[in-house]
Amino acid sequence: MLVNMHIKNLALIGEADIDFFEGLNVLTGETGAGKSIIIGSMNLALGEKIPKEMLKDNEAAALVELVFQVEHETTLRQLIDLGVSPEEGCVILSRKVNKGRSIAKINGETVTVSKMKSVAALLIDIHGQHEHESLLNTKKHLAILDEFARESLAEKKRRLAKAYREYKKACEQYDRMNMDEEARIRELSFLEYEMQEIEQACLQDGEDELLEEKYKRMKNSQKIISALSAVHEMINGGQDSVSEALGRSVRELAAAAEYDERIGSLSEQMAQMDSLMGDFSREMAEYMQDMDFSEEEYYETEKRLDEINHLKDKYGQTLEAIRASYEEREKQAELLRNYELEKQNAEKQKEECEAQVLKLCEDISKIRKKYSKQLAKRLKDSLLDLNFNDIQFEISFQKLAQPSANGFDEIEFLISTNPGEPLKSLSKVASGGELSRIMLAIKTVLAGKDEIETLIFDEIDSGISGRTAQKVSEKMRLISEDHQILCITHLPQIASMADAHYLIEKKVRKNVTNTEITPLSEEEMVTELARMLGGVTITDTVLQNASEMKALAKKIKMEK
């Protein structure tokens, strides 16, 4: 769960440090107090894009840090698979932004934003103000059903994804084989021409590197000969040459060594230098003789190198790549030579892959239909709890003309909210407030199957009031039994259920406006409930109503 959030230099927040707890954590405040900054800050730490309006104009860096305590064994294993090693279950996500550049870190180690998102997806799920609108997209319905049936579907869907990839490859191979005789002959002729071009080159291992070195030496032979000649002149060029000087030095030291044994060692070293110089001079002379080549040899070397480079341009940048290209063309040519047989094999392979895909699609569809009945009943019961007095809910199935990696099912949630009305698509029936409750019902049903410990609800109470608000608050409390909930709300009914309550408000100090987040005591919770109930003027009656609402919430929690 999320145990701490630290924010610095973001929007109207100078610095804030917030501890969160198990159960239902509620954040409330006046409109415009900065509640959206909290969600924006969390999204920033979870790897989302950085809205420019959230960054201050000053030079100070913005920072958001989230500290999670992970308890689920499955989540811990998934984190390790992503390369994150929680220290005693602790995972710290941080994002620092300075002058338009951001640095993401997990447990102090710099990571990519994509990795940050992958890790965050295991730890937290944010349900925004407009997420319920995604229910108008029927693809979302299938995702919800598959999540509900995940334990039974996961392996089948994995196998289907693999089988579908093989099926697509088989289709591509069959399409390549599906050509007329003229095209086949033309394609085979071209492949044989390319193969012959490579064969006739008679490439030798390492030949290109040797030729490159030889050509470079030949091309720069005048510079090389000039340099070597200059050196040869300095070493062997008469009385002032290095060789002559070394010879005289050897003779002089040999003569002096007769008078002092210590000079004998120096004489030996000088004799070795003279010998080395002689060896060097002979090797250099041999090299200069080797540099003697004809124009024809230079031309042949250049021509051979051009031939190899031409093959590299067409078939690959190395000799190994050229050979691999030859082998690939040889396989294609063999297919075309045995065209009718290979076409039959390709068609058979396609049919076998298609049969495997359709079999898996059928199995997956049966599982979905089985679980759809359970999901529809669970959702209907949950919606009744959310003050849908007379509701019908079904999940309809349509079979797609062509299967996909996700099966051949297309489903849609159908609902009737009034007696006597036929079942219709959500987009034709549900209002914004109803969609919010339907999404909450879905979250409730999926909560028991969801291993993500922390759920955030950002003002999902739009269009809800009265008795419905009370039902929503009780449903929120129910989810918080198995999950940590952070809920930004305007409804006092939801706020009254809080296990921890935070007030978000703007304060002006020294002509500077800041958003502050304050954890409330029991007494302060009642005062905040009174503000939410009564608005500007908080009378004794409103305070008494707030106190009664809080007491009723405690009673409900104890009973449940």
Image (tube, rainbow, N blue to C red):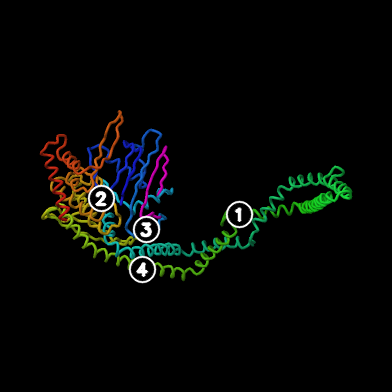
Depth order, front residue of 14/141? 14
Position of 234 relative to 410 (above/below): above
Is 437 left, or right, of 158 in this rendering? left
Q: Residue at x 32, y 37 (%)?
A: 13
Does dot 3 land on a helix, a strand or a loop? helix
Specify the quadrant of the image occupied by residue 58.
top left
For disc 4, the marked residue is 356
Q: CA distance from mark 1 to mark 3?
A: 50 Å
Q: Residues within 10 Å of mark 1 (few under 14, many from 20)?
A: few
For disc 3, the marked residue is 78
Q: CA distance from mark 3 to mark 2?
A: 22 Å
Label 4 vs 3, first from the N-terminus: 3
Front disc: 4 or 3:
3
Label 2 vs 4, first from the N-terminus: 4
Segment colored magenta: 85-106
Position of 135 relative to 38 (above/below): below
Q: Residues within 10 Å of mark 4 (few under 14, many from 20)?
A: some
For disc 1, the marked residue is 310
Front disc: 2 or 4:
2
For disc 2, the marked residue is 485
Front disc: 1 or 3:
3
Quarter of the rendering occupied by the C terminus? bottom left
Label 2 vs 1, first from the N-terminus: 1
Residue 366, x across and y down, in percent: 26, 66
Q: Residue at x 74, y 45 (%)?
A: 223
Label 1 vs 3, first from the N-terminus: 3
Specify the quadrant of the image occupied by residue 147.
bottom left
Is 551 left, or right, of 134 in this rendering? left
Front disc: 1 or 4:
4
